[in-house]
Amino acid sequence: MELLSIDPLHPDAAAIAHAAELLRAGRLVAFPTETVYGLGANALDARAVERIYAAKGRPAYNPLIVHVASAESVSSVATEWPERAARLADAFWPGPLTMVLPKRGVVPDGVTAGLPSVAVRVPSHPVAHALLAAAQIPVAAPSANRSMMLSPTTGRHVARSLGDAVDLILDAGPTTVGIESTVVDLTSAEPVLLRPGTISLVQLEAVLGPVRRVSASSSDAARPSPGMLDRHYSPRAALFIASTAEVARQCANVQARGQRAGALVIDAPAPTAAITIRLARDAGEYASGLYAALHDLDDAGCDAIIVEQVPDGPAWLGVRDRLARAARSGGESGGGHR
Ligand code: AMP
Ligand code: MG
């Protein structure tokens, strides 16, 4: 595995050309986007895409997001560009929004997990943009981590999770948005929010009108996207969500079992003897710091992480979704072991 440090704002042209060449040759390149680091492969090369699944240990039923340099390039992978897609692109691209559209035949089944649709996004990170522009191919890129684990927000996270399974890592330091893109399905009459992110339902509805929400926690509803039910985005430590008042007691429970407790708080006082990370009461800032905080608490050897409940507002939907998926189901930290 090769690791190249690259300036996040003014990426070195030779490094970009090298990475683009590897992608065109069917190799795997991890690169920063504004959301998390992606593990990229030529989206039109079935064997290259197969390598993504192998490197991540990702189940074949979980489709990938295809990254392109501009809205004009969407036509290389999708058969339609509806007017509402154009409006969304005007409002949010380049940026952390993924649209699901009917796919072209040239897109291998491996990219879409056999679905007749393809997920596409134009990222805003200067390194991602430069790479896509230089490669001149659509690039399939899920998060650059082993399947089910925490997404990487630094090059170091990628190196630790994937090691030699990736050919090149472009390391541009921490990403800014910090959680995965908002995913909206435009293949049916009514747009559907498949995955919340930092672009909120309110912002989407301002452009699209009513958007249906598929709740990750509503158990039995049919899911258009197979990846959605999975336990996902998890630290190694067991993660529990607690009210502000309960954080300290739950940490004490963990310690009473002789285990190491970590706490991720907003307003709660730092619990005694727990390793505590504090994030701001601002949805954007919180999202930006969330995965790095969980990686750090894992690295510190925490057995359990007690996360102070986040606010209820629409801006926090993406963060709440990731925390709910990372959390140990079945309540509080007094419960079972992993
Ligand atoms: P990740 O690569 O971990 O960011 O996950 C990509 C996610 O995008 C998947 O888990 C799905 O939720 C969504 N996705 C990708 N392609 C499609 C598709 N064709 N239809 C619906 N959802 C998709
Ligand atoms: Mg992922």
Image (tube, grey):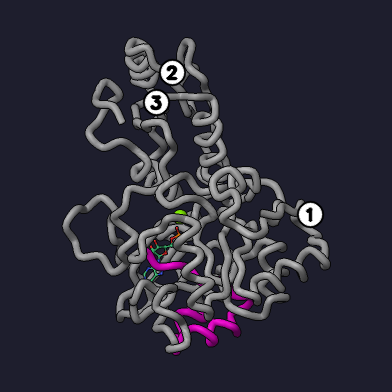
Q: Position of residue 319 (x, y in %)?
A: 44, 45
Q: How many marks?
A: 3
Image: magenta residue range: 62-86
**SS for dot 1:** loop
For residue 90, side relative to residue 201 (left or right): right
> Residue 336 versus residue 163: which sits nearer the camera?
163
Looking at the picture, tell me which residue is in the foreground, 128 or 62: 62
Q: Which mark is residue 7?
A: 1
Q: Are marks 2 and 1 in contact (CB under 8 Å)?
A: no
Instruction: Give the mark nearest the N terminus, 2 or 1.
Output: 1
Q: Is residue 258 above or below residue 214?
A: above
- Contact flag, marks 3 and 2 (Cβ < 8 Å): yes
Report the residue marked by disc 3.
304
Label of residue 239 in the image = none
Identify the image quadrant of residue 27. Answer: bottom right
Q: Amino acid at mark 2?
A: Arg
Which residue is at a point 42% across and 83% down the rendered structure image?
103
Q: Is residue 86 visible?
A: yes
